[in-house]
Every structure is written in structure tokens, then in C-alpha cells.
Image (cartoon, rainbow, N blue to C red):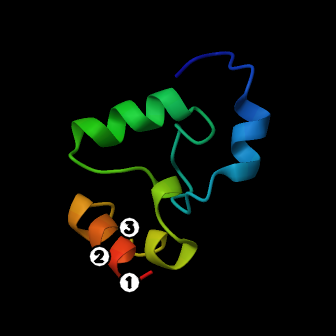
Amino acid sequence: MPKECKNHEKNMKMCNCSYEPCSRKGYCCECLSYHKSMGELPACFFSDEVERTYDRSLRRFMAQQASR
């Protein structure tokens, strides 16, 4: 993880990731890279309710968008 990020404090105010041991919280570049490698999207793409399911799949994202 990066030792410094000028936006970390600001990012943390917007981060809705509920996975407590996550070391990428607030480090958006690291988070995006990680989830992309897993074929997923990060928590911030989902509503809080959907995010808590930890289903970060593209399919779940599309279903969430369709239900809006």
C-alpha cells in the first residue's frame, strides 16, 4: 500500500466499504486495481445495502442499475 496519498482523508469520508480488514480503504487506485483483477467493482459503485452483501460482481452492479 502507498505510504502517502494526498486524498486519503477525503477518500475515507466517501468510502462505504464495510470489509473491516481491508488495507485498501481510502486508497482508490489500489482498490480499483485489486477489484479489476478480481473481475469486480469496488464498494463505492454499490448502494450501502448491496455493498454489505459483498457481491461486487458486474452482474450485481447491472441488476442494481436496472432496479433504479
- Which kind of residue does numbered mark 1 sit on? Ser
Q: Nearer the viewer, residue 9 or 1?
A: 9
Q: CA distance from mark 1 to mark 2?
A: 6 Å
Contact, mark 1 vs mark 2 (Cβ under 8 Å): yes
Give the residue pinned by disc 2: 63
Q: Nearer the viewer, residue 1 or 65?
A: 65
Q: Is residue 32 above or below residue 2?
A: below
Q: Residues within 10 Å of mark 3 (few under 14, many from 20)?
A: some
Contact, mark 2 vs mark 3 (Cβ under 8 Å): no
First in residue order: circle 2 vs circle 3: 3
Q: Which quadrant of the figure contains the C terminus?
A: bottom left
Q: Is residue 68 above or below residue 45?
A: below
Q: Secondary structure at mark 3?
A: loop
Which residue sits at x=41%, y=36%?
32
Q: Is residue 31 left or right of residue 61?
A: right
Locate residue 22, reporting x and y percent: 51, 46
- Which kind of residue does numbered mark 2 sit on? Ala
Q: Residues within 10 Å of mark 1 (few under 14, many from 20)?
A: few
Which residue sits at x=44%, y=75%?
50
Where residue 52 is drawn, which disc sits there? Answer: none
Where residue 67 is drawn, which disc sits there? Answer: 1
- Which kind of residue does numbered mark 3 sit on? Tyr
Q: CA distance from mark 1 to mark 3?
A: 18 Å
Q: Is residue 36 left or right of residue 52?
A: left
Where residue 54 is drawn, which disc sits there? Answer: 3
Q: CA distance from mark 2 to mark 3?
A: 14 Å
First in residue order: circle 1 vs circle 3: 3
